[in-house]
């Protein structure tokens, strides 16, 4: 079983493409919701956040995300501290989850910040989902009812698409011109072959 990352900028279409891989019976690990769950429940993360930011970052429902965000907002050291707790915990959780799927030719890890977080280093290969900026902006404005400025702010935390593509083994063009299903099926076949060769 090989481990495949899938990434791409905001609104590139990672989620709908992962749903297509799931239809092909490929398990997908969604890093962002898993990270959120770990920040609520993982005792080491909880203790690390309380040690640094005080007990009020948690309440009975779990982590107060807005409170934490307001503390670490624009504070680079604090953001790095949070990442130093969360990224290794997600990596360990992904390995544990992957071990439940060793009967599959490959599993996928979906993350918007797959390269930025360092997670890509632990994977066999990466797919970047590519889409033109104007299409991505329009999609997210519609999906999230967000302003272009709010979306741009989220984009500013992400590597440029060209850099992600440069470091990827596969690209899926979700530009509403090329067939997504054809591209997904071709990559699925290649990944199955790669996996068989690795055995
Ligand atoms: P994020 O990083 O914000 O989670 P994402 O990369 O997962 O974004 P999606 O949520 O899959 O992106 O897609 C963004 C929006 O664009 C969704 O509403 C989705 O339904 C729509 N979309 C994506 N690809 C296409 C397409 N080829 N045709 C029409 N709509 C699309």
Image (spheres, rainbow, N blue to C red):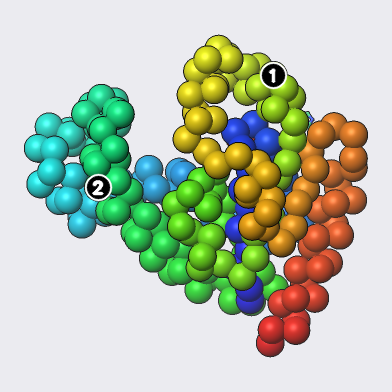
Q: Secondary structure at mark 2?
A: helix
Q: Earlier in the sequence, mark 2 or mark 1?
A: 2
Quarter the C terminus occupies: bottom right
**On screen, 20 above or below 56?**
below
Q: Which residue is mark 1?
A: 138
**On screen, 2 above or below 16?**
below
**On screen, 187 above or below 64?**
below
Q: Is residue 41 left or right of residue 20?
A: left
**On screen, 199 above or below 170?**
below
At x 50%, y 30%, the residue is: 156
Provide residue 61's location: percent of width, then percent of height: 24, 34
Disc number lying in front (2 or 1): 2
| Residue 26 appears in the picture as rendered | yes
Which of the pair 104/49 is nearer the observer? 49
| Residue 16 appears in the picture as rendered | no
Provide residue 130's location: percent of width, then percent of height: 73, 41
At x 60%, y 33%, the residue is: 10
């Amino acid at each position: 079983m090989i481990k495949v990352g899938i990434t791409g900028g905001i609104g590139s279409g990672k989620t709908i493409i992962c749903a297509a891989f799931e239809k092909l019976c490929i398990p997908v690990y969604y890093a962002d919701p898993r990270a959120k769950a770990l920040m609520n429940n993982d005792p080491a993360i909880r203790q690390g956040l309380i040690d640094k930011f005080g007990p009020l970052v948690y309440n009975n429902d779990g982590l107060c995300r807005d409170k934490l965000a307001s503390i670490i907002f624009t504070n680079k050291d604090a953001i790095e501290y949070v990442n130093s707790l969360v990224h290794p915990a997600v990596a360990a959780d992904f390995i544990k989850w992957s071990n439940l799927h060793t009967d599959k030719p490959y599993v996928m890890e979906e993350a918007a910040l797959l390269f930025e977080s360092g997670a890509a280093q632990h994977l066999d290969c990466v797919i970047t989902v590519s889409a033109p900026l104007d299409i991505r902006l329009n999609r997210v404005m519609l999906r999230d009812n967000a302003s272009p400025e709010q979306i741009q702010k989220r984009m500013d935390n992400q590597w440029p698409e060209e850099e992600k593509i440069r470091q990827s083994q596969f690209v899926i063009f979700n530009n509403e011109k090329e067939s997504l299903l054809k591209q997904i099926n071709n990559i699925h076949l290649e990944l199955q072959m790669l996996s068989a060769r690795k055995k």
